[in-house]
Image (cartoon, helix red, strand yellow):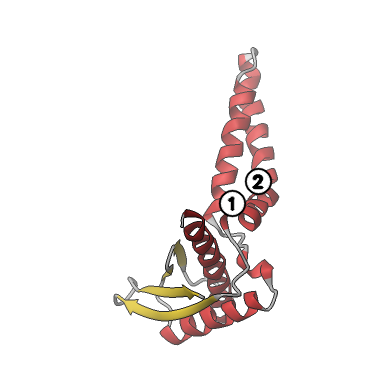
Amino acid sequence: MKSDLITALRQNHALEHATVSLLIRKLDSNVRIIGKSTFDGFYIYGNVPSKAVREAATEGLDRLQNGERELGVSPLCGTNIMVAGILAGVACLIALGGKNRGQRLSLAIMAATGAIIAAQPIGRAAQKYLTTSANLSDVTIKRITRRGTGARILYKVETARG
């Protein structure tokens, strides 16, 4: 049961990434969109047309199911930010442990910068192997609902398995 929930969350996370990526490509690249995955689907926050959300979610699911696994990994994902923060924090702790007080700040800045650069591929790998699953062969889109008006629009994309 627990592993089924984790699998569902990872699958929905991949579909959320694919949907957001396709929305950004189809709409103005400056559009503000936020996604949040859940066990039963995902949310899209943003003032985007309902038709565009439906088309992007459907196309994203189809493309993931047909082997375009890279759509499930996003450079905009919070996983990347978390990995960068953890690596930068650890690097700074190590750099600040030195004895020469005058060099600590410059060492901390260099260490944090190096960690943030290293975090990009590590964050993508964390998504690919830990936080997303592009294996959506048994996933379908159950329904898409819209709530809100104006700048505060929310879509719930519900998924089902089996």
Q: Secondary structure at mark 2?
A: helix
Q: 94 or 146: which is nearer to us?
A: 146
Give the residue at the far front of this rendering: 1
Give the x, y percent position of residue 73.
Answer: 62, 62
Give the x, y percent position of residue 95.
Answer: 64, 24
Instruction: Give the spatial CA distance, label 1 vs label 2.
Output: 7 Å
- Looking at the image, residue 101 sits to the left or right of residue 16; the answer is right
**For the residue marked with disc 1, what is the amino acid?**
Asn
Q: Which mark is residue 119?
A: 2
Q: Which mark is residue 150?
A: none
How many other residues sit within 10 Å of disc 1, few (<14), some (14-19) or many (≥20)?
many
Q: 67 or 97: which is nearer to us?
A: 67
Pointers 1 and 2 in contact (CB under 8 A)?
yes
Give the x, y percent position of residue 46.
Answer: 41, 71
Give the residue at the far top of this rendering: 99
The residue lying at 58 percent from left, 82 percent from top is 59
Give the x, y percent position of residue 31.
Answer: 49, 72
Give the residue at the far bottom of this rendering: 51
- Looking at the image, residue 127 sits to the left or right of residue 6; the answer is right
Residue 27 appears in view: no
Residue 160 appears in view: yes
Q: Secondary structure at mark 1?
A: helix
Q: Which residue is mark 1?
A: 80
**For the residue marked with disc 2, what is the amino acid?**
Ala
The residue lying at 67 percent from left, 50 percent from top is 120
Q: Please report whichever mark, 1 or 2, sits nearer to the chain's N-terminal start.
A: 1
Q: 66 or 98: which is nearer to us?
A: 66
How many other residues sit within 10 Å of disc 2, few (<14), some (14-19) or many (≥20)?
many
The residue lying at 60 percent from left, 37 percent from top is 88
